[in-house]
Amino acid sequence: MAEAMIDVQNLTKDYGTYLALRDVSFEVQKGEVLGFLGPNGAGKTTTMRILTGYMPPSGGTARVAGYDVFADSMEVRKRIGYLPETVPLYPEMSVWDYLDFTARLRGVSNRDDAIERAMDLTNIADRADTLIGKLSKGYRQRVGLAQAIVHEPEVLILDEPTIGLDPKQIIEVRHLIKSLAGEHTVILSTHILPEVSQVCSRVLIINQGKIVAEDAPDRLSARVRGAEHIYLQVAQPKPEIPTELEKLKGVLGVKTKEPGTYEIETNLGADHRAEIAAMAVQRGWGVLELRPVGLSLEEIFLELTTEEDSSPAKDDADEEESEEA
Amino acid sequence: MRNVWTITWRELNSYFVSPIAYIVSAAFLLISGVLFSLILTSTMDASLNGTFSNITFILILIAPILTMKLLAEEQRMGTLELLLTSPVHDWQVVVGKFLGSLILFAVMLLAPTLLYVVLLAAFGTPDYGPIISSYLGVLLLGGAFLSIGVLASSLTQNQVVAGFLGIVILLLMWIADALSRIVGGGAVGDALTYLAITQHYNDFLSGVIATQNVIYPLSVIVVSLFIATQVLQTRRWR
């Protein structure tokens, strides 16, 4: 495998006695869009600030495009476009002057073209001469985004990029981020859960400074539960149905929800719906409905970030992480 | 150097779209103009000595007002995060901002006072030596004051606090001369004399350019900007 674009190993950050990050490790491949999910204060912004060279880590290493974020900070900064949580804007400047300033800072050679490109992509070309202080929140957010992409960075780090936008703009920005993936490697943080499943190829859930889960959004659901779940509803409920189903290979357990509906737990990573359907037809149960059950991201999120040690999901997630903290 | 100039250029543009540059410039020219005409009519002496020796105190009050927003506002607005994550060194940010305020000072405050020299030349025969050295002296003095203002601005997110802090530091340096006379000789007295701003400045007004008087304001500038850079860097650790 090629060297990861972003390589974070055992990253730790403390603010005095408060541990903001505990032993965080992850990799992002070139062209990937990684979503950071977590409650406020989980360590998302801290991780991003370390990656962008704004603050040094207390321990561990982080490399971007092969350069250490602390030792080779300047090389890293040249390759990163960063949209901080508070959009860094100068209200007294016009949009064009501001983008010109940020392009100069990054040493962009053909600034006029770069600025026009960034303004087109973020849909702000009609406000080039407007003072930033007079712009609406949605425009400001997009000016911030334009600033982050004006120098065509290899890596984009976006802290809550869609905050303050109206639904139409949110969709536009998501499209923009998706279109940037491939060429660019993107890390974005958000607390809007559907956003993650729409935009990101991989999700990292952080809670209290630790990674509690990491996977593709659709696979997280199964991961969190530790098994695939299938919902079955039949027309002729019979008492022997659960035991019959459990005889099938790969079926771990069957729960009767109410007469005629069952939740079947099966092996992770396999689809047993065909076998179940075949059996149901053969025995004449009369299948009304058969579908896989996925946890919504909201459920996963709450599952992972709520302190409930009894939940099986938590145990599964913790296998990835040492629990010494 | 290109990075420094980028910062300086933005800072100058920002000065000229805010009223502060014009207000400070107008106030400075009004006060120095009144001083100039009063001193000229009473002494009938074709020199800037009297005017420039009184400028010190005006600059103590004005320089920190020019610099108070430079770093404090960036910290408050979150734009410092943009600067510190751009491929720019921290010292380049500090020096760029300082140069912005110094250029503003030279163009908006000092350059218009050349009119006084024109008036002196029109109606008398001024000695140009002391006038040239006075301008060098006031530029160095202004630079030292502005650098202390930049340092004050790095310490807080609040512009008003930054401005007040700058004025307090400059006032302390201003009265160091008087303190040194109270303390008398000895190491402490000598140190206070060296720190006293007016001691170094007054020689320029009488036409003397002494090496140590040039080195003093330059070292104040270097030390202040160095500390301001360190303060920015410690912000990263918090």
Image (cartoon, grey):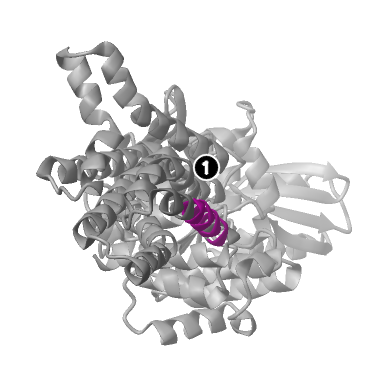
Q: Position of residue A56 (x, y in %)?
A: 33, 41
In the image, B161 versus A224, the foreground residue is: B161
Tell me the amino acid under the disc marked 1: Ile
Regarding residue A4, the answer to whether it shows in the image is: no
Image position of B142 with respect to B16: above or below: above
The residue drawn where x is 12% and y is 45% is B210
**Residue A40 location, x and y as percent?**
61, 40
Left or right of residue A159, residue B6 in this image: left
**Which residue position is annotated with label 1?**
A206
Residue A173, image quadrant: bottom right
Q: Residues within 10 Å of mark 1 (few under 14, many from 20)?
A: many
Magenta span includes A159: no
**Closer to the camera in the image, A140 or B10:** B10
- B122 or A293, which is in the foreground? B122
Chain of the residue that carries numbered disc 1 in the rendered image: A
Quarter of the image containing the C terminus of chain A? top left
- Label 1: element kind: strand
Q: Relative to A170, say whether B38 is above or below.
A: above
Q: Main secondary structure of the magenta part?
A: helix
Q: Does residue B23 belong to the magenta stretch?
A: yes
B212 lies left or right of A149: left
Q: Residue at x 13, y 40 (%)?
A: B212
Question: What is the span of residues highlighted in magenta in the rendered image?
Answer: B22-34
Q: Quadrant of the N terminus of chain A?
A: bottom left
Q: Quadrant of residue B226?
A: top left
- Horizontally, residue A243 falls left or right of residue A174, namely right
Q: Position of residue B151 (x, y in %)?
A: 37, 40
